[in-house]
Amino acid sequence: MTRFPIGIIALIVVSVLVFFGLAHRVLDRMRISDKTALGILVVMIIGSFIDIPISLGRVNASVNVGGGLVPIGLAVYVLTRAGSTREWIRTLAAAGITGIVVYYIGTVVMKGNPGGTFDILDPIWVYPIVGGIVAYIAGRSRRSAFIAATLGVLLLDIINWVYLLITGTPGRVMIGGAGAFDSIVLAGIIAVLLAEIIGETRERLQGGPASQGRPKKLLRGLKNEEYADTSQTEETAGADIKPEEREAEDQL
């Protein structure tokens, strides 16, 4: 992938939205505070310029802090903060599916047909769009879609690295770096936007969160969380919600 600053620009735009509180709803659903989100965004921007060498054999490899280590750390943080075992499995499966689809698009569809129609498409845009859509379909919730999209696109570099190691082919891999950084950032944003837009549209069409099979306590909390009681802190609002009830909330 060719280095293009669209990822940095996207992160700056998101940082501005978070700073002015315009992304509070999405962050709240993902169980991330505004301050934590800003910290993560700053680390990603700074880390995008830092590569840690991990060369093995004839493969000259490195991992980018902002595009490799931070997304992995963020995925673990988000899931351990509000996830269940079932969500862990679903999210990791969605990430694997996303990675396989993106790898297929990049190696078979785009590179397997030189001079064809897909040659005019830039991987920097194709990977995040495909990854974001697949991640949302597979992950469903905002949290799962975001993690599956970022890790799924990151898997493309990891798969290439493992392939070079297994085959003994000399090469250079920048895991999460160069253009991959841009694709990872855009994939996460696209997945979350899809989850937010589709989820919000579905709720409005059905007159609110789906109530069938959901605990009454959870439904009261969902209705108050976004429109009524803004005085509760995140910890207070979710203190009496059981893990299985929290998992039901994630599907919205």
Image (spheres, rainbow, N blue to C red):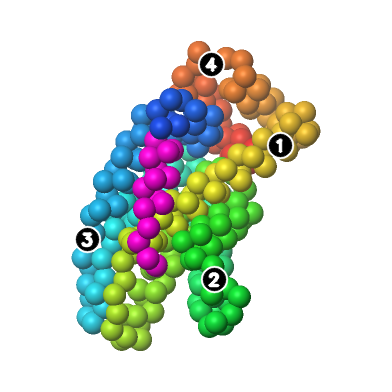
Residue at mark 2 to residue at mark 3: CA–CA distance = 32 Å
The residue tagged with tag 1: helix, strand or loop?
A: helix
187 displayed left or right of 219: left
The residue drawn where x is 38% and y is 79% is 163
The residue tagged with tag 2: helix, strand or loop?
A: helix
The residue closer to the viewer here, 9 or 215, is: 9
Question: Where is residue 129 drawn, in percent x and y?
Answer: 56, 57
Question: Where is residue 236 drawn, in percent x and y?
Answer: 48, 20
Is 114 rendered above or below residue 102?
Answer: below
| Callout count | 4
Q: Which residue is mark 2?
A: 120
Residue at mark 4 to residue at mark 3: CA–CA distance = 43 Å
Residue at mark 3 to residue at mark 1: CA–CA distance = 42 Å
Q: Hey, what amino acid is under mark 2?
A: Ile
Q: Hey, what amino acid is under mark 1?
A: Thr
The residues colored magenta run 1-15
Q: Which residue is mark 1?
A: 201
Residue at mark 4 to residue at mark 1: CA–CA distance = 22 Å
Q: Which residue is mark 3?
A: 52
Question: Which is nearer the N-term, disc 4 or disc 1?
Answer: 1
Question: Which is nearer the N-term, disc 2 or disc 4?
Answer: 2
Q: Hey, what amino acid is under mark 4?
A: Thr
Residue at mark 2 to residue at mark 1: CA–CA distance = 34 Å
The residue drawn where x is 46% and y is 61% is 124
Question: Which is nearer the N-term, disc 4 or disc 3?
Answer: 3
Q: Hey, what amino acid is under mark 3?
A: Ile
